[in-house]
Amino acid sequence: AALQDDIENCIKGMKEEDKKMKQFSTILFQVDELKDKRSEMEQEIETQKKIANHSRSMLAKDMTGKHSKEELENMISSFDVKMSKDEDDLHEKQKQYSEIQEDMDQMRSRVVDLNGKKGKLTAELEAHEKVVAQRRDKVEDMSSKFGVELHSASGGLGLSGLAGTSTQGSMSTVGRLSTG
């Protein structure tokens, strides 16, 4: 009965680990999405910088020969409006970039926490399997020492569902003991 409880606890632990692995995968996906957004914003900022540099270079050109004073004043007025809008856009993009960077930092922290929990659970599962194997060995030793026939069902249960490992442990459940 204790062995069956141990097996059920191990199975329950493995299901919890699967659940945590799904959470971990979701977080990694979110981190990738945030990286993509950050990259897009970096590109947008670079584009805005290039536009501003081009506009500045246009200011350096002497346009008095090609345009009237009124046209130049209108160009300056529209340029001021465009620069103001571009600066506002740039500040908004920088704010969004900072928010995404903060979100990514939080996600990284969460990934580290989940990896710690995963490692702890893996160690607990390995220790549990070792205890179950020791108990099985003791029962088998006692059955052979005292001439008790041991009828058992054997099933494989191990860490195969965790992080790509393929370790296979063998555990037996005691069905009945009979003297022979």
Image (cartoon, rainbow, N blue to C red):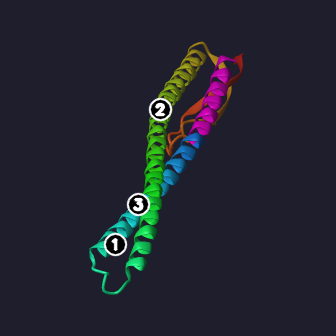
Precedes in sequence: disc 2 or disc 3 = 3
Tell which of 36 and 17 is nearer to you: 36
Q: Main secondary structure of the magenta part?
A: helix
Kind of residue indicated by mark 1: His
Q: Which mark is residue 45?
A: 3
| 72 horizontally vs 175: left or right | left
Kindly report the distance in space between the C-alpha atoms of the residues bearing marks 1 and 2.
47 Å
Tell which of 124 and 109 is nearer to you: 109
Whether residue 18 appears in magenta in the rendering, the answer is yes
Say which residue label 1 marks: 54
Element marked by disc 2: helix
- Closer to the observer: label 1 or label 3? 1
Which image quadrant for residue 87? bottom left
- Closer to the observer: label 2 or label 3? 3
Tell which of 80 and 47 is nearer to you: 80
Q: Residue 113 carries which label?
A: 2
| 173 horizontally vs 129: left or right | right
Residue 39 visible in the snapshot: no
Whether residue 169 appears in magenta in the rendering, the answer is no
Element marked by disc 1: helix
Q: Residue 103 carries which label?
A: none
Counting from the top left corner in percent of width and height, residue 174 is at: 68, 23
Numbered range of the magenta stretch: 1-21
Q: Residue at x 37, y 78 (%)?
A: 69
Q: Do the residues labelled 1 and 2 touch (CB within 8 Å)?
A: no
Element marked by disc 3: helix
Crowd class of label 1 (few under 14; some 14 to 19; many from 20; radius 10 Å):
few
